[in-house]
Each structure stands twice: as C-alpha cells, then as structure tokens.
Amino acid sequence: MEFALSEDQRLLQDSLKGVLGTAAALDQIRKIAVGDQAAADALDAALSDFGLAALMVPEAEGGLGLGALDAVVVQEALGYHAAPSRFMATAIASFLFKASGTDYLGALASGGIRTGLALTELFSRRDGAGLSVAQDKLSGKCLLAMSMDGASHVLAAGTDGRIHLAAAPQALTVMQTIDRTRIFHEAGFSGEGSVLAAEASPELVAFARLLVAADTLGAAQAMIDKAVAYAAERQQFGRVIGSFQAVKHMCAEMAAKLEPGRALIWHAAHALDTGDAEGPVMANLAKAYMAEAGTFIARTATEVHGGMGFTDLVGLHYWYKRIGVNRQLFGSPEQAREAAARLQGFAA
Amino acid sequence: MEFALSEDQRLLQDSLKGVLGTAAALDQIRKIAVGDQAAADALDAALSDFGLAALMVPEAEGGLGLGALDAVVVQEALGYHAAPSRFMATAIASFLFKASGTDYLGALASGGIRTGLALTELFSRRDGAGLSVAQDKLSGKCLLAMSMDGASHVLAAGTDGRIHLAAAPQALTVMQTIDRTRIFHEAGFSGEGSVLAAEASPELVAFARLLVAADTLGAAQAMIDKAVAYAAERQQFGRVIGSFQAVKHMCAEMAAKLEPGRALIWHAAHALDTGDAEGPVMANLAKAYMAEAGTFIARTATEVHGGMGFTDLVGLHYWYKRIGVNRQLFGSPEQAREAAARLQGFAA
Amino acid sequence: MKLDLDPEYEAFRAEVSETLAKNRHLAPTSEDKGYKNAKRIAWQKLLIEHGLAARTIPKAYGGYGGAPDILKARIIAEEFARSRVPGPMAGQGISMLVPTLLELGTEAQKQAYIRPTIEGEMIWCQGYSEPGAGSDLAALRTSAVEDGDDYVINGSKIWTSTAKQADMIFCLVRTDPTAKKHEGITYITFPMTTPGIEIRPLVDMTGTANFNEVFFTDVRVPKSGVIFEANKGWQVANATLTHERGMLGDPNATKARFLELVTLMKTESVNGQCLMENPLLRDRLMKLQAEVYAMQANGLRITTNRLKGEPAGLAGLIVKLNGCDLNHEIARLAIDALGELGILYEEGEHLRADGSWQWRYMYDLGLIIGGGTAQIQKNIIAERGLGMPREPKLAKA
Amino acid sequence: MKLDLDPEYEAFRAEVSETLAKNRHLAPTSEDKGYKNAKRIAWQKLLIEHGLAARTIPKAYGGYGGAPDILKARIIAEEFARSRVPGPMAGQGISMLVPTLLELGTEAQKQAYIRPTIEGEMIWCQGYSEPGAGSDLAALRTSAVEDGDDYVINGSKIWTSTAKQADMIFCLVRTDPTAKKHEGITYITFPMTTPGIEIRPLVDMTGTANFNEVFFTDVRVPKSGVIFEANKGWQVANATLTHERGMLGDPNATKARFLELVTLMKTESVNGQCLMENPLLRDRLMKLQAEVYAMQANGLRITTNRLKGEPAGLAGLIVKLNGCDLNHEIARLAIDALGELGILYEEGEHLRADGSWQWRYMYDLGLIIGGGTAQIQKNIIAERGLGMPREPKLAKA
C-alpha cells in the first residue's frame, strides 16, 4: 500500500518546475499577459521540448504512456507557475483518443496535430452557441474555446451530445477574460468535417474537471506560499505580521482547506487510472472542492498581502484570476456536485 | 425620522428583563428544565402579572394595544433569559384574531382563554400527521404543538390550509426536544369543534417567524455577552484569553453578524405594523438570517468558553439549545428564504 | 419608530426636486469630461447657490451657509439619485480637507482654499499611506526637515488617487523623528507643482491605475502650509480619517448593486433555464438580500443616532467590515450566476454589464483591505465595541 | 501510487476474517455489560492469543508479541468493522498508559501493570487537565509534596472519564513549584482507592456525565508510583498526548456517519418529497461528501508516511481541526434535513436514530474544543506546519 507520488512522478514535477522556473518566471508571465508573442512562443517551445504532448499517449504510439495521476501532477505545476499551456487540451485529447481507440495518438505525441478544446456547450448553452452536426459537417459557434492559437485541430462538443474532432476553424474571435495569460476564443464553424465523433463520457468530463482542480491546487499552493513568505517579511506595528495570531490563523485555514484537496485529487486520478467506479464521482467532487477552496484561498492570501496584494507590483493577481477562471471552467461547483450526485443515483 | 425603540419600548424591555432577572434566573431555568412545576408556574405567573397576554390586544378589547415591534422586543427579552413562555402563542393568536376580527380578543387579554399553537404541519407534514376538517370537526394529530400545558384552546393548522381555533385536545403526548425548558406535545384531535377558521396568511406566517427570529436574537445576544465576560476573566498562558487576537476576532465576528439582525428585526416588525408590503419579505428573511447567525454564534460563543462551555456548569447550553430549536421552528431557513422569494415573484 | 418625515421635510423634498427639474438642462453630460470642465464648474456653482452642494459651508468661504441637517442632506442625496440629475462634485479635497480647514485652519488658509476647492477650481490629493506604513499609518517615515521658513520633504506616498489632476496635496510628514511615533507628525499642504515631486501610476489587479505613488526628493515647501500646528498632525488627520471610514460600505450603494443582480438573474438564461429558476442561485440571492435589508436597517439606526448626537456604537463599527464584504459577495454571486461568461472582462459580444461584476469583485477586495483591513476592523469592533483588551505590549526582543 | 495490498497481507486478512468467523460465538453481547464482565475479559484474552489485540505488546507482559505492522493493524480494524464482531477493549490505560510504561516504565511497573491492563482486569483513568489549566495544560497546579517515601497530593483534575470505574489513575502533579512550569511536573500512578479522593460526575451539554472531576485532599501515595523520573513528567506525558491527538478525527468513523446521513436522506420524506430530492440539501450533502473523500485520502497519505517512517507534516497536523469540524457539520446537515423533528432528543414515536444526531452535534462540539481547541490547532498548523513565528513574548505587566 503506498498512497504517494512515485519517485518518477516527483522527478517529473521537479524537472517541469525547473523548466517553468525560467520559462514561466513572473516577468515572462507579465510579458505573455500583455501579448508578447515571443515570450508565449518561448514557453510553448519549452513545454513542447519537455514532451508534454506525448505524456498520456501509449508508448506503442510513441508516447510516454503515463496516466491521469501524472497528468494532474503536470497540471498542478502549470497552475503553480500560472503558466499558460495547451497541455490540458492535449491531455483531454489523449484521454478521448485512447477511449475511442483512434490512430490520432501518434500524431498527437509527435506534435503532428495540436488540438484546441471547445467543450463549453457541454455544460452551458446560451447566446445562440452550439455546434450542429449534419452529414458529419459542423456548423455553429462555440464560446470560450481553449488553446486555439496554433491548433491544427479542435475537439468540439456538438449538440448531438458527442465530441467531434475537426480541423481548427478559421473564424476565431478572442474572448478576453480576467486571465490575460490564457487566451479563449469564440470559434465559428462553417462546415468543417467531423473526422471523429466520440461520446462525451462521464469519465472524460470527470477527467477534464479533475485537471482544472489540479490547476487550481497548484495556483492556490503558490498563493499560500507567497502569503506565508510575505507575512514573514512584512513589518507592521513593530513586528512581522506573520506573528499576529489573526494572520497565522488565516494561513492555517488556507493550508487546512488545501491539503485534503491535494490528497483527493491524487486519489481521484488514481481511481480514474485503475478504472475504479468511484473515480468519476471523486473527480467531480474534487473540481467542486477546489473551486470553493480556491476562492477562499485566493481572497485570503490577497488579504494577507494587504494593499500590496491588490496592486500589480507583486503580481499576485495572476494567480487570483487563474483560480477565478478555473472556478467557472467545465461547469460550476454546483454542476460538478450535481454530476457526482447523479453518478451515485442521488439525483434524477 | 426615528429608527429606534421608543422610550416606552425600552421601558417595556427593561422592566420585563427586571422580572425575568429573578423569575428566570439560571437556577430557576435549571429547575424548570428538570420538570419542577412550581418553578414553571412561578415564571408563568410572573409573566401573566406582567400582562403579556394583553400586549397585542386592542385597548378597546381591554388590551395594551401594542404591535409587532413591541412583541419582538418582548420575545427578545424572553430569548435573552432562555425563559419558556406562552407569549409567542398568545401574540400569534392576537395577530390572527385581529386579522379575522373575532370577539376572542377580550378573553385572550383577560386570560379567559389561553391558546396553544399547533402550526408545524403548515410547514412540514410527515409521520401521518395533519388535521383534517369535516363539518367543522377536527381530527388527526399535530406534531410539536407549543404551549399546550395549561391551554384552554389551541390554534391548529388544518389540511384545508386554514388555521382553526378549537378547545385544547386531551390527547397530548410530550415530544421531548434538546430544549427541556420549552415543552412540545403531539396533540391528537378527535372531533374537537373548529370555532374559528382563518386563512394562514403570509402576514401571519411572517409574524410567527419574526417572533422566532427575535427569540434567537435575544438568546444569541446573551451568548455573546457571556462569551465576552468569560474571555475577560479566564486566564491561559499567563493572560486573559480575551487578549488573544483569535478570541477577540471570534467575538467581533459574532457581534458583526448579530447587530444587523437586530436592525432587520426592528425594521420588519415596524413594516408589519404599518402594513408595508415589504414587511412579510423582511420578516421571512429575518427568520433565515437569525437562524444562520444564531447557529454561528451558538457554536462560537461555546468555543470561546472552551471546556466550560461544553459542561453544564455555566449553563450556556440552555441558550445553545434554544437557538438550535428556533432554527427549525416554523420552517427551515431555506423555507423562509423561499417564502421571501415567492412573495417577490422570484419563485413559482 | 417612525420612518416617514415631518411635513417640513417633505416640503423641502418637493422644493429640491423642483429645483433639479427646473435646472437639469444646465447639468453637464457625458460629453463634459475632465476635472476642470467649465460646464461642470458652472453646475457646481449653481448647486451651491441653491444649497444642494457645500450646503453647510459658511457663505464667507463660498458655501451656501445652511445649518447642518442630516435629514436634509439625505433628502438631497435621494433626490439626485431618484431624478438621475448629475450630483455635486466629490473628491478628497471637498470631503476631507475642507472639513479639516473649517475646524483647524487659519483664517488665511480658509480664505485661500475653501472656495476654489468646493467650486471645483482647485483639486486636491491625499498623502497619508506609505509603502512601509499601511495598517500602521502612524509609522510613516516621509521626512520634513526645517530650513528657515521652509520644510524640505523626502520620502514617498502610496494609494494617492487623483495625484495627476491635483493642484495641491494635503500630506502627513514626520517633522520630529525623535518623538513617539504619533507625536512627530505634521499635517501640511503644498502645490503639486513644487519641484521634486514625481508621480508614478499604481496599476492594481483590476488592470487600471486607480491610485498612484508619489515620490518626494528635496521638495521645499513653506511652513505656512502647515495646518494647525507642527507635530500635531496625527490629531488633525484623525478628524478626517473618520470621514473616510464612513464613506465605505454605504448600504444604499449596496442595495443598488443587489437590484442589478436581481435583474441579471431574472433576464439571463442558461441551457434554456432562467437563472432565477435555479434553486441554488435563488437561495444564495435570498441570503444576500437578507444582509442587504439588514445593513440598510442598520444604516437607518446609525442615522438616528447621528440625529440625536449619540454614538452609533457597534452598529457603526461594523459597517466597513460587513458592507465591503457584502459588496464583494454580491459580485461573487453575479459572476457565479453568469458561469463561464462570468470570467469575461473586456469589450465583446458576450460581455455582460461591461465586465463591471468582475471589476467590482476585484475592486471591492481592495476596499476590504484598504482604509483598515478586515483584521484591523475586527480589532476595533472587539476593543471599542465590546470593550475587550487591547493587544498586549511585547517584550523587547 | 498503489492502494491494493501485497498477497502476504491479503492472506493475513483472510486469516483474520476466518478467526473472527470461527470465534464470534464466544464474543460478548449487549447483555454482557460493565467493565469487568467475565465474558468480555475472556474475549479480550482470546483476541490477544490470536494477535487481534495487544498485538505488539511483548509476550513477557501478556501481549501477543507481534512485530509492529501498521498495515496489519489496519486490516484487523477493517475486519472487525466489516464483520461487526465486537472488537478489542479500548480505554486510556491501554491506549496511553501501556505505551508509556513500555517506553519509560521500570521492569517492576511493567510486570505489575501491563498484563492486567491489556486483559481488562485493571481499569485506568487519566488525570491531566485541571479547571485552571485547559489549553495551557502545563499550568497545572495540583501539588505533590514529598514526605519520606510518599507524596501528599492536593488539588483537582477535570475531564477524567471512567474515574468511577478505574482501579488506578495516571496523573500529572506539580512536584517543584519553584521550577519553570514545564520542569516541575511529575507523572505518577496510584490506586483510586487511596483515601482522600473524591469523584464528582461532570454533566455536559449532552445531558449526561461523559466525564468527571476528581478532587485530591491530602492523598498520600508512594513515590514508587512515579513513572520515569520526578519533574520529568512533561516529557513522559507528551509521548502519550500524541497518541490521544491521533485518536480524534478518524476518517473511517467520519465516513460511516456520512453513510448514515445518506441513508437518512434517501429514506426520509417531508411533505411527500424525499429529502434527497431537495436540491439544497443534496448540494450540501455533496459538499460534505467531497470533504469526507478528501479526509479519507488525506488519511491514506498519513498511513503511507507512517509506513515509511516519515513525518506526515501538514497532512497530519490538520486532521484534528478538519475531522472534528466535518463530523460536526455532518450532524448539522442531518438535523437540518430532519427539520422540525431534528430537534427531538428523547425516546418517542417520532424520534429518529435515537437522537444520536443531536447527541453528536453537541458531543462533536466538545471534541472540537477538547484535546486542543480549534485555535490551538491553528497555532500548531501555522507554527509547525508553515513555519510561522510563535506568539511573541509579552512585556511584564
């Protein structure tokens, strides 16, 4: 019995954090946030060289053959550095391709295809969005599509309840969110062909939500680390603020909320890897748990920083906004909890 | 413009608190809780002498002609002393009699009739409870009927959606709750005649809920006062615990939750007195607000007392339990909020 | 308990509303931008003339010269809100400096500054906070060294809004570094055109520069700018700080936001369901409405206390803590209700309410921190409101 | 990550389950009440014989003499739970005194106390807390004054469970009032039959006396009862205090309660609607389930740390704070779900689950406070878990 990250997984996370320490240092994130393409490309290249695209592709298909637990370890590191990356889209594509046994896995690993992700309408349809499918042709628009920059293909949710692989559409309009590091688009389809249609399985949705939870885990951990460090430096009333019981308890409450979330995410990922029936339930609950914990930590860590936390000077807001966006991605906490309830037959 | 209790209302509350200070001193409450009838009778007599029965009865009918705001002032004082009293039942009866213009008001003021209250099934029906009405005869059972001891009559909710006045039934079974100071009964009806049937109006339900909110206001205020006093006495680690920032902030948070509740209750009562359409909305929200604030304060004040708060030694639990019972009376916070939503057309 | 007003006041309300109706054509529009816009200044002067601005400022200093009357002030505010006619000018000069001058300024200072300030011809900014002195304001280190009839100022200030537009600054500086921290501070005023002043915009999490940093390098200013006395600045500042605290957490502003949220939930639909039909969102909305009503009623209580000249006690001490948090929570529910589209922030087809919910969700967090963090507020509530012991003195390390 | 067990352990599980199945007819039933019930003692001896109780206690002292193995211990616990066969005896003698004796007792003390204690022939109670020393345990004042070969003890203890049933007490007393508060304490054992001991039941908010107060008046006890050394009692106690902390907030117990709540919400109906169909209650249930899963996973993490002999760090430090709060919240939702009937507490037709939800709602609050209040827990998490500064020393008043 061993409930812990393996040596390899720790190594994976450490080396990735090493890469991100430079390629996604705060000054790089600042550049990316103001649209510096060179900085964005440099980070993208660094992560490609690291081999993230191949992570979840079976070795037989030229990948690393790793699983959901490895993926959340990676996503946590990305969140910790507030690093934009197409990894989430790629990991979800790998999961879907593996489930539907297609021959796109090799191309995905080699970088031959790079997929964007347009799943929003699986969870929320409005503003006339939605992708209709007729004779395997896709038409309509998807809101808040992810990782469309530089994508050759896109995985998009159709109104037929299935997820379609298609060539990335040309009609892209930026939808600017509070998080300027990650770019979202409105994607307009006009007859692009669906080269693959797979069921939007509960496992796939659960895995997608789990990745978001892991991203928030990393971002929230970063905010706690920064708050504790700031509290050890900042002097007020003749003492470091970290010696005030109120500040100590704020930090303790953040840690007490976050730590179980880490274990829950590991457990959910392992359950998905082993096909444990509880896996999707745990993954949905992990998304909801981290959305709530993240909201609390984002606010509390900012309060520990006082006025500095509100300014752009320390850049704390990049993590605050990342957590804020993650809360809404792939469905609200309430939707994730309701999904968990349905999986257990608690709700119709 | 004056948003405050009048001189008379402050006088009313002070003189009532004077009476309760002796008749409902903690040692008296302890006696009542173990079924000491003499202590219970003494308190009942003291409150009768004080004239609570006549409070809301119009002067023309031999009452004091006071209103909802005066009633909440009284109920708050009763909650502050964790004092059992039939005042809530009497006040609700007065409200209903006034609304339906009956000739029972005089008898109510003189003590000629003493009404119990069986409204539970207005909010929650189960265990086969419910009062059916046929040819003005009542049959069936009501759960958690209040103030049935010494009641000549009862106001009971019928399955016809109306509230009926009838002679108090003989078949009474005690339903022992965590609050041993207030006795609740299961009341079994077997053909008692309905001498009056009135609509269970939104105003009546709102007023009943507002009284519960006021009771919790008083009980919660008592718990805060006790916590602050204890924190000023109790020494740990060579200083009074009230000097620890964590304890100070616990007390500050309790006060910050309670104080707006007091203003809300006053405003809602005044609105009911003046027939302001927002009155029932405010009263329902006040019930929900105080239920939540009360739960927080009951727990936090106990924590401030440390182990002593858990013991019977300081008797703090009488207030903890009073607040716990009030939370569920006349519908949950969720039901009260939903009622407020319906009154505003936000819910079907 | 009496919430309606006496006939005298209802008459006053009618009079105000008539005045506004009669003159609204003279009011500035969205075209009339900027601080010294002629039309806005003319409008301000007209409002003063009718006692709708600077109402209690003596005529001698350019005000209307009316007697203080909290109810009339409230009626005026309500009528501006109801009629949607542009209101009087605000700003730290009018809200904080002028009251201070009236209380503690010399006749010369009053003559020189009050009229142009209330008429909008003279803009002020405030120099209190410093990077090293946030919650602990009295720890400020910006130094002012005597040199003949001048002080020479070195240091920096932060959280200074309107620094770029300001003609003048009112500022706290340390004139006696040897005295106890509250006793070596002086409240001084001087022109922002004085050589040696550098202004750096302070971008915050909302992405805009709502505030500035101001740097002083050998800034030479005349002693005549001192308000009241040298080394008495702490007392001078506290008179106006209380004003500032009062400005945060206004329940009527909170109610207005709540009503916007109600409209949002009534009009937005997701997956074909109106947001208001979602029982979880509706229950959260009702929770917030209870708090909105409660803080409004709490506000009425405070107004009554002020009318009677009584201290507002706990009812007053909690306003900043509860009010700012409630605003933040209203914005949070609005964002949650909008779901995926709640994260949008910039111009575009799908943006709702110009992204103002996200802006408020961030800016309100700034207000939770600014003007005394939530932790400071809780200390104040416990110590002043509940009479609990102050933070004990520490042993010298 | 590997959650299944090696074949060796699966084999062990089979063996345990077989042993339980074969012997369950010998297990005590609800008829076999009381602490020294013959059937219960016989059962305990049988369990020790099969290595299902006192497993790691050396044979020489009456134990099974097995090697420490956290997994086997967990398997045993799981099998008892699964099979619903009555488990081994618990109690502070077995869980706290025996480990202390094994570590620091004299050979004579081990011989005298361990066997009867683990076999249930000798019941112990704990005398640590005092009315004046709660969170600040080391401030205890019960005095033990040397007199020849004896100590004479005066003072009182609180929160002493099983005081009435106990043959012996292990107790912290102040033997050197002049020393620093942690250095004048002695850990001593003596019979509860010693003259001068008075026991007063301590009724708590649940309405029952789950604990006692114990008063000492000139209680003369031999020095031979001292464990380890005089004035080293603080170190002795800390060895076992850690045991106690670990006992609170067990995630498996929490999960069992959660499942009871699920059953409640599936089976209860109000106004003709099953509670599980209520979206607000269901959402709260799912919130709690997320925490239950999280604390279970957190528990697996801690077990792994212990298997590796590593410190559990934050994962360990949060267990008491989160676990006790989660239990309290589960009880709270159950009561809210039951609504009006949730307030019932005593025997009657409409009482649900014997009123256990209300009992837990109160008792769990006691556990939130006991064994280190939530505030103490947060101090520990901040200082030991996050490396934040300790509470600074105060200036002498």
Image (spheres, coloured by chain):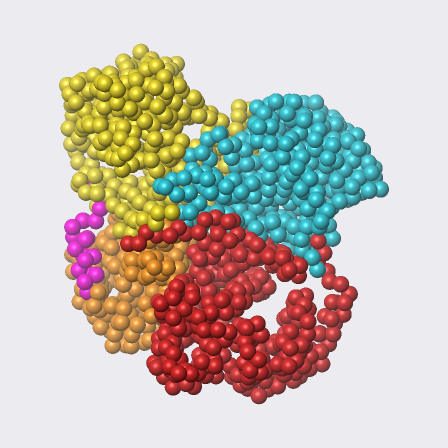
Chain colours: A cyan, B orange, C yellow, D red
On the image, the x and y values in percent for residue D258 come to: 56, 61
Span shown in magenta: B1-19
User: In the image, residue D40 lies at what x, y percent?
Assistant: 58, 84
Which residue is painted at 28% across and 34% down in the image? C178
User: Residue at horizontal 40%, vertical 24%?
Assistant: C212
Question: How many numbered marks appear?
Answer: 0
> Who's the residue at 48% across and 30% down the image?
A313
> In this rendering, would D34 be left or right of C100?
right
Name the dominant secondary structure of the magenta segment: helix
The answer to whether any part of residue C259 appears in the image is no
Indicate whether C395 appears above or below A38: below
Image point 51% across, 35% down: which residue? A316
Q: Determine the residue located farthest toward the front in the rendered image.
A: D148
> Which residue is outermost to the right?
A60
Any magenta on residue B4? Answer: yes
Residue D185 sits in quarter: bottom left
In the picture, measured across the screen, residue C124 lies left or right of residue A154, that is left
Q: Quadrant of the N terminus of chain A?
A: bottom right
Q: Nearer the viewer, residue C329 or A143?
A: C329
Q: Position of residue B154 (x, y in %)?
A: 32, 67
What is the quadrant of residue C75 in the picture? top left
Q: Is residue A125 magenta?
A: no
Q: Residue C302 at what x, y percent from top left?
A: 25, 41
Q: Is residue B325 above or below residue C145?
A: below
Q: Is residue C81 above or below residue C393?
A: above
Is any atom of residue A74 visible in this view? yes
C179 lies above or below D34:
above
Determine the residue located farthest toward the bottom in the rendered image: D38
